[in-house]
Image (cartoon, grey):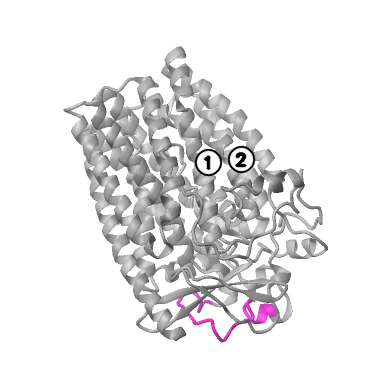
Amino acid sequence: MGRVFQSVSSLPLLRHMSHNGVVATLTGPFFSLPYNNVVVYFTMYLLELGITERQVGIYQTILMTTQIFASLVSGYLADKYGREATVILFDILSWPGADLFWALSDTIYGQIVGGILNGINKVVYVSFMCLLTEKATSPQRLVNFSGFHFTLLVGGLFTPIGGWVVDKYGLVDGERILLLSSAAIMTTTFSIRHCMWERERGAKAGAHAKGAGACLPSTHTILDVTEGEGERERETQSEGGEEVPVTDTVTGDVKEERGEGEGISDVCEVCDNSSDSTSTSVVADALPVSTEALVLPDTSEGKSGTSILGMDTDTHTEVVGGVAASDMGVEGEDREAGVTGETETEAPTEAGADSVTEAETMWGGLSAAFRYFVSTTPMRYCLGLAAGVQFYVIFKPLFYYDYLVKTVGVSDRGVSLVAMGMAATTIVMLLLVIPRVPPRLVPQALSLGLLIGAVAVSLLVVLETHYYVPLLATAVLLDGISIAVMRPMVDTLWSDMLEDERRASQLAGGHVLFSLIALPAGSAAAELYKWIPASPFVAASLMLLGMAACSYILGHYLRKEAQVARDTQV
């Protein structure tokens, strides 16, 4: 099986990914197919059951509240019990478990129970993104995100299946069939994926598993901070204790970093943290992580689903297991040197000033993460951009398909074609356009994509009074372009701004903030939709304009820091 996996991983779309990036990409379609078919009709399904628009908003608020509490413990659980264990357990509870409640309940209370179960999927987010980005360079992370989110779009090409089921059996019975089949398919997919994750090999597996979150990324980020000039990232990767050049995440230039002390390769293997067992995955030997600096990814992401099911459309998005050195199973000199052995080059940040004891606690880690988020101007802009996207992906899609059916006049089967068209457009963008965007132009490209999205959403308002099929097709086309640009680029910008050694706690802290900001999104969309059906899309268009400006300003700061970095090298 290992040889088969290695052969598959050499395909053009997969060869520049890390091992776990390949695993996520190969299994992604079997999640996205049932998800995309369910999500198109879910809000209409709730309304058909007699649940009001306001109750839908309350449901969304409860779901978001659950996500906040799940985010508070997500980094702690990821580090304490291991990535694989938390992913398989909470994935099963939050998707197949929620599907069963949604399918079998006729009341708002049963739907809320399903929403609460689905909300705990936030626990999975940290562990899943740790698996997706550990032992991956910054360019590999973008490829991993792109490939995984690409597979999430593939399911959108098959939404006409859901349209056929709903057309044949009716909205309620058809959606229940889709939900029950989703539970079966996702359970099988999660189980297979669990067996494929890369785990640590050799005698050190048991020793490392004893540490809470005993995983150290082989790509270690060091932040050079110059007063008044922000920070820039430099990445080094070790193989056998020797440094190899990788690409600067800001400038795109190949550079080198000389380490002091021991190399980190001995503690850089991804391990199964759930036990002391030295057993390996059936595909553990399948794919060595590439150390070459990649210019650009082969694919990138977008996703057209609504977050009524608790899917952020950002499942996406960016992590390495960031825990304190004492939690990584690292002993002796490596721990004293902050794991990197490069204490002289590590500049103190506000987050980094926390004591090791505080960082070992869940609340201490979150507190440190919050302070880090506001420590520099670029970080604050990136935080605002990521938080805005989180609000948007809940607010805009909530009544999107219901609006097309009840206000614009698209048929039930027709909305499945809308979802398919949006997915197809995004896939073409990911294959032909996104890979050609230079890393230094990511903020500007993101700004352009957000502006295109604002135009697309504005066209939805026009469709309320002027339903014209070519106009609808144009809106779908532009929306697909915006989605393709938005998710992978926001994920990458956010990921590159985080510290590797504290990435899990910073990711959890970020999602606590994002969830708090997005908490009223569902209720706000519901009230606006109940007032004037087109008003949520007017508001969504304004949000995109604001985020486009934020991305452009962030790009200005990153270019300035890149210039400072080049001047310093000279």
Return the residue found at the far left.
Answer: 465
Q: Is residue 199 above or below residue 472?
A: below
| Residue 545 coordinates in the image, percent (x, y) | 25, 52
Residue tagged 2: 27
Provide the residue designation for mark 1.
Answer: 151
User: Looking at the picture, which amino acid does disc 1 mark?
Assistant: Thr
Q: Can the viewer see residue 227?
A: yes
The residue range painted magenta reads 334-354
**Badge 2 element:** helix
Q: Work out whether 251 lies above or below 176.
A: below
Report the Cα–Cα distance between label 1 and label 2.
8 Å
Q: Residue at x 21, y 30 (%)?
A: 463
From where the camera sits, is residue 318 visible?
Answer: no
Q: Answer with left or right where residue 161 lies relative to residue 244.
A: left
Question: In front here: 487 or 396?
Answer: 487
Quadrant in which the C terminus appears:
bottom left
* The image quarter in which residue 406 lies: top left
Quadrant of res 185: top right
Image quadrant where residue 56 sits: top left
Secondary structure mostly seen in the magenta stretch: loop
Give the class, few, some or many, for how many residues have Cα within 10 Å of label 1's Cα (few <14, many ≥20): many
Residue at the spot 65% in from the left edge and 53% down from the top edge: 19
Label 1's element? helix
Instruction: Based on the picture, tell me whether residue 353 belongs to the magenta stretch.
Output: yes
Q: Residues within 10 Å of mark 2 (few under 14, many from 20)?
A: some
What residue is shown at x 54% (from left), y 84% (from top)? Answer: 345
Q: Identity of the amino acid at label 2?
A: Thr
- Label 1–label 2 contact, CB within 8 A: yes
